[in-house]
Image (tube, rainbow, N blue to C red):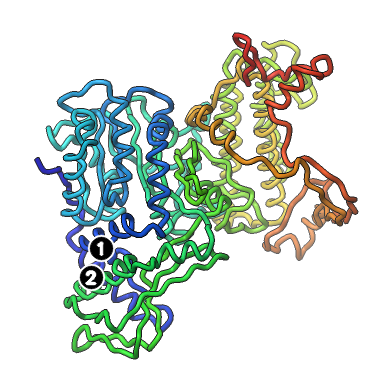
Amino acid sequence: MSAQIIQLHSENADANISAQIVDGLRRPAGQKELPTMLLYDERGLRLYDDITTKAPEYYLFGAEEEILKNKADEIVQVMHHGETQVSADEVVLELGAGALRKTSHILLSLSKLVSDTSFRAPITYYALDLEEREIERTLGEISASEVGNFLKGKVNTKGLCGTYQDGLKFVLDGGLNFDNDSNSVLPSFRRLSSGDISPISSTGTSLFTDEDSSFGDSDSTPISTPDETQLPLHFLFLGSSLGNFSREGAVEFLRSLPLRAGSGDTLLIGMDHDNNKAVIEQAYNDPQNYTRAFIMNGLRVAGRALGNEAMFQEKNWEYVNRYNPERRQHEAFFKSKCDQRIEVSCQVHYQFLEDELVKIEQSYKFSDTDAFGLFSESNLRPIQRWTDSSQRYSLWLLERPTFVFPLLKQPTMTLSPFNAPNIEQWRLLWSAWDCITLRMIPPSMLYQKPIDLRHICLFYLGHIPTFLDIHLSRLLEEPNTEPQSFKPHSDVPEKDEEWPSLSSILQFQSRVRARLLKLYSDISSHRMAFTRKIARVLFMTFEHEAQHAETLLYMLLQRAGTGTLPPPGFAIPPWESLAVVWDAAPLPKTKTVTLGPAAVTLGHNDAELNDVDPVLANDVDVHEFGWDNEHGVRVVQVGKFSIDWRPVTNGEFLDFFSGKGQDLVRVPVSWIEEDGEMKV
């Protein structure tokens, strides 16, 4: 029986590709380009298969296949958080499935999670690609293969014919709700809303605008969590296909994936490293000319889309490629061998100069910095990473957590006036704060001190909104929101019953947050001018809350295993799998690194008195704020010194404690001993 394939192409798909071709060719010399999609017609997909099977220079396929051959079982286990059996009605969707040779390893491993065969397989795999006949062929080959025998009654394979956007729209529109064999509704999926997909908007947020500034009377800002009945959706995006997007486009695409925050949904993505220039250029231009045949087929497809397959004469073009190590970008071009004129119609023609380049494909490569920056901007969190034996390629398993900690410097970051935090950043911080204080601290710990010299946990829930409220009142010259029952900062209650209740603190917190959002609204509507003084208060209170989140996490770590709860919505790290990777990592060649002598610049030029300066107060240029004791730039001479490359590891400390340090140091309070084994 042939595989079931759902046609997703829109009726005007051909018109869209023609429009893209015309848009790319009407550009000036040196800027012309053709859409990469032209390479992946039915013939192009088969030519690409030739590259992956006959051109060893194209290392990406072999590296990824090596990882999957050796690690597919482990990848699937980590994908399912260590579970040995899969839940019913789970969906795996592959974007740009291709020949499925690599995917077969994942499918086989998935089948091992199903203990018994059944009439209705509990796992459904969808292969999304552009050409229906190719999808039918590849799914048929899988079904007829040895792997196919293991999939029967365990993994059902189906096809989706369309673009990435078509496939994602299918998911967002509830297409996964129906079992297309029996037309019965699956209980595990519903139509996703934008709130399910990402804790942060996928579009840039203004400093002052906010779609919903009302916090109502709820006890806390809710953390996005799915219904318990929703089962995971797993995306596969192999082949380093993400590299075909621009850097900004990759962020936008990953943000658009319907991964429900904190639900167990995952993305397995392949990413090529920033390898040697010669290695990359040969990978995309093999001496056997398999890549050339694949690329040149794009001319035939472009002509066909414009009405004449022979429109672009192959003899008048050649294929050239280049890699830019600084941009970590490979580019593929058609190069015109002569001055030529392409006639599309009596009224439309395109002129090409000799040696003029027409871009057909790009492939960005990823350093570790690129990868982590991309994940952070895309609201994704790495769960595990697998790398091939040559260290040239990685598979990453990612999740969409309920919140993310952004990098100090984002690759595509735009700074706001005065460098003040925007509303999106506040909401992200509040999501983190609420998770830490309301989800990681059990009720039994609220009146306990994680560290003897600090306050009880409940104190910090009230301290943060109180600090914000005090500074808003001073700034706006308004009364405090604080209820009369709240005590001054230094007057700490001695008895549990003397503390305000958790519900009253959270109601107070909600009102203070609403007050802050009203300030942003007033500035946005020009009811209030945005000044450097306002920006300072916003920066200071934002950093104050972030600092307390960090220190509170440190304190809660001391109670790990004796009270503190793991953060919900985050996959528990696969420790055994990670340990294998860490143990295999090469040690530094030397124990220490020598630094200095050097002149080190410290501090900020940030005098608070300038906030009321008639000129500087309204100068909205980006400014670097600091705390009062940081003001004044000074240069310090640091002498030459040596320092270890790495901090002391848990293992090294345990060896020291068990040996000569046994009577000199104590066991860290975050360590516990179980059955004679020390655990963190």
Q: Amino acid at mark 2?
A: Val
The quarter of the rendered structure image containing the C terminus is top right
**Number of numbered markers:** 2
**Percent position of residue 613, x then y:** 79, 61
Q: Residue at x 40, y 67 (%)?
A: 285
Choose the circle earlier in sequence order: 2 or 1: 1
Which residue reaches farthest left? Answer: 1
What residue does disc 2 label? 301
Label 2 and label 1: CA atoms lie apart by 9 Å
- Which of 4 and 521 lies nearest the eye of the viewer? 4
Q: Quadrant of residue 493?
A: top right
Which dot marks residue 44?
Answer: 1
Q: Quadrant of residue 426?
A: top right
Q: Quadrant of residue 611?
A: bottom right
Which residue reaches farthest top? Answer: 675
**Percent position of residue 311, x then y:** 21, 80
Please tell me whether residue 201 is drawn above or below residue 307 in the rendered image. above
Q: Residue at x 68, y 63 (%)?
A: 621
